[in-house]
Image (cartoon, helix red, strand yellow):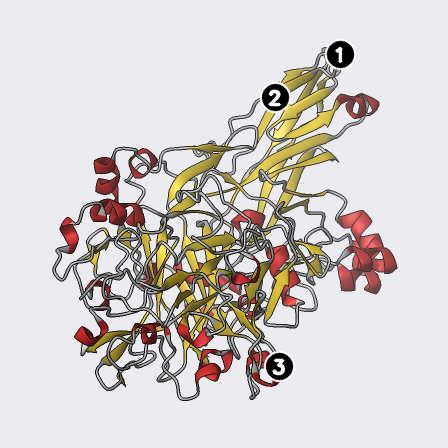
Amino acid sequence: MNKSQRIYFSTGDTGNQNQDKYITIKLEQEVETLEFMSMKLGTADVYQDFNSDYGVLVGRVIANSAIGIPNARISVFIPLTDEDAENSDIYSVYPYKTPRDKNKDGKRYNLLPRVSQINTETNLLTPKQPFGSFPIKEEIVSNPPFLAVYKKYYKYTALTNQSGDYMIFGLPIGTQMIHLSVDITDIGEYSMTPAAMVTNLGYSPNFFTDNNSKIKGSNDLNDLPHIETQEITVDVRPFWGDAENFEIGITRQDFRIRSVLTNTFTIFGSVFTDGDKKMWGKGGAKDQNFRAYEIYNDGAWEDVGMINKRAAKVTEKIYYYPPSISDDRINSSDLATRNAAIDEMLLLDPSEYSVYKKGGDFVVIVSCNRDKVITNEDGTQTPVDDDYAGGLFTKFKGFMTLEITEDTLNLNWTSSGDKTQLKPLRQILKFPQKADVGYSGGKPYCSHTFRFENLSGGAEDSDKWRSQYYNFCGGCIYSLSKFHSIVFNDWGQNIMDCCKCNSGFGGGDYPNLGCHCKANYNAGLILTSDYSFTGNSYYGLCPNGITCSSAVNGVPFCMFGSNWLNMSVYLPQTGWVTDGYSYWCGQRSNSQFTWLAKNHTYYMEDNDQQIAGCYSNTCSFARSDINWTDFIEVPKEDILAMQNVSKKGFVANSSCSISTNIGGHQLKGTYRNGCFIPTGTAVDWVRPAPEGGGKKGGTCSCSTDCTTYFYKGYDSSDVIQYITSLGIV
């Protein structure tokens, strides 16, 4: 059995900054492994060098007083000798007699890479913007002067591990100058983005370009806000302090970087809606209730197609639980306790996060504000109180709403028939949201008069809706997934006496019935193939097996609906009856958008229903029992694989074991489809899709559709290209 002996240091001592220490310990001969900090040293190697006069230097690179920083670079600085100063080959590569001397490019001594390289395990490029002068391995082994310099002047170098620890073994004893180089945009899970450096760290935008997405170039490392270098003089003591008593000594030197880091996460996605003067709902004659499920059009079929959609800048709102609200209160089974926590939620001010928008694409970078941790002695993360002086937050609890506002795309028009007039609304979505059918945010009943706030069961449903949040983790990238709901209405029936009070649907309503050929009477369904015109195929949304055999010239229509769509969100424009509603028997809109009840306009006009905290008005919010939404974590490796897919819309083949791949790349993320049921979240996902949804061909078949559907963005939008261009991946 391997016998180990641990050597303890006073890790994280903030009393004397950057003070070196010399620790001696009596070594038992039967010990095979020495453990200190997060590192180990095999004593078999130690005994081989028993008579050597050398030292061992260890330490940790620390930020925020208590967080170990990975990928920091440490070296013993060795001055250029007078002899090598006369050698032009050596001098051109290594002109440094002091760490402040500069090379021919004007860069001081540093250990940062000269060029970016692709990590063979992740395919990620690192660093994203190289500013250093250190040669890469290929240059060293193929260039004799580089190799000679490396062997002589860089022989004592180290790279910190995931805990921020380093060790240099066998260096000369005595006074040594120890150098640190660190790039805070290239430190693993704690890496800062240029945008976060401006918004969260307070750096001047003058250091950055391209809307704070890139760092201005400079050969003077002192001008670069993300790079930090330090030199500390250390007295390296002998490793073998007492050969007769088998005592050893280890010298420790920590570095504390000046930058105060914040831990951020990213949300990205793309949004599109219906075209100008297009909406689901059309004015018509008396009792033509199916018109509420028909796209308002000039030519029927093409108006449900992709050619008549449009991208638009989205407006996001981020609601969150402040750190003062405990997890126990947030997740309490006691309704009153949980509601009290919801009442204290806050709306994150836009000045507190970074946001980028282009067309329908958007990228949001948010700082974590809960669950603070530090790096303890053995290198693991340890929770501390939120008021601890140091450490790093790792979590964020909250939800997001998305909408396209009136000032972005105007909706000042109506649809008129011979008896009615309809006005458009554009759906607003909360992420995440989910409810069982008939248990949406509120539950009006079939009556000409009702008071929303006092409905039996309605308040509880609203509370459940408000309490659904997502637990974001620092360093992660998230996108959106929305169940693309559809509702067909049998045009041969009307709603007069058929209001389904237990579900919120009207007479003749069939949720998520994609097999019906009258797509222009099936609210939310999108035609993805061409129909006697060009356009739909260009936009590239993949169909999910819904077809209509009665197409022109015998060519079936291909459509999408009744399944999850990942990364892009469709926000339909839905009409509601503002005049002549008595001729529609009280129905004011289609049930894909809202709960049906006679004369019901609660979600069609401004109201006082609470969203969270002191914020209210759920006008235009889509019903949550069929319009499910979720966040999906997207690893950087998956984003790179998606970037190589030429089409805007694509699918990942999947089985019910949720194994997915794109072009041979095994996706690491877990995305929403008709098979997957998330677990361990704040939302109780009891099944993979709303009632009737997630089936093959969009029908009420019992066979689930395990294919995963992605869409990068409408028309010129491409959120994968966009997030990559911002340097986040």
Q: Position of residue 40 (x, y in %)?
A: 68, 28
Q: Secondary structure at mark 1?
A: loop
Residue tagged by mark 3? 554
Rounded to the nearest angstrom, the CA distance separating label 2 from label 1 is 16 Å
Question: Can you tell which of label 3 and label 2 is closer to the viewer?
Answer: 3
Would residue 267 be found to the left or right of residue 71 on screen? left
- Rendered position, 132 above or below 252: below
Along the polypeptide, which appears first: circle 3 or circle 1? 1
Residue type pointed to by label 3: Gly
Q: Secondary structure at mark 2?
A: strand
From this view, report whether residue 138 is shown above or below residue 721. above
**Amino acid type shown at disc 1:** Glu
Q: Amino acid at mark 2?
A: Ile
Give the tally of numbered discs.
3
Q: Secondary structure at mark 3?
A: helix
Which residue is denoted by mark 2 in the rendering? 7
The residue identified by callout 1 is 30
Residue 89 coordinates in the image, percent (x, y): 83, 63
Asked whether disc 3 touches disc 2, contact meaning CB atoms under 8 Å apart, the reply is no
- When asked about the image quadrant of residue 289, the answer is bottom left
User: Which percent across, then down, holds residue 39?
Assistant: 65, 30
Mark sitting earlier along the chain (3/2): 2
Q: Name which residue lies at 46% across and 34% down.
A: 16
Residue 375 in percent (x, y) is at 51, 35
Asked if the residues shown at circle 3 and circle 1 are in contact, with their CB atoms under 8 angstroms apart, the answer is no
User: Nearest the camera: 30 or 238?
Assistant: 30
- State which tag comes first along the sequence, 2 or 1: 2
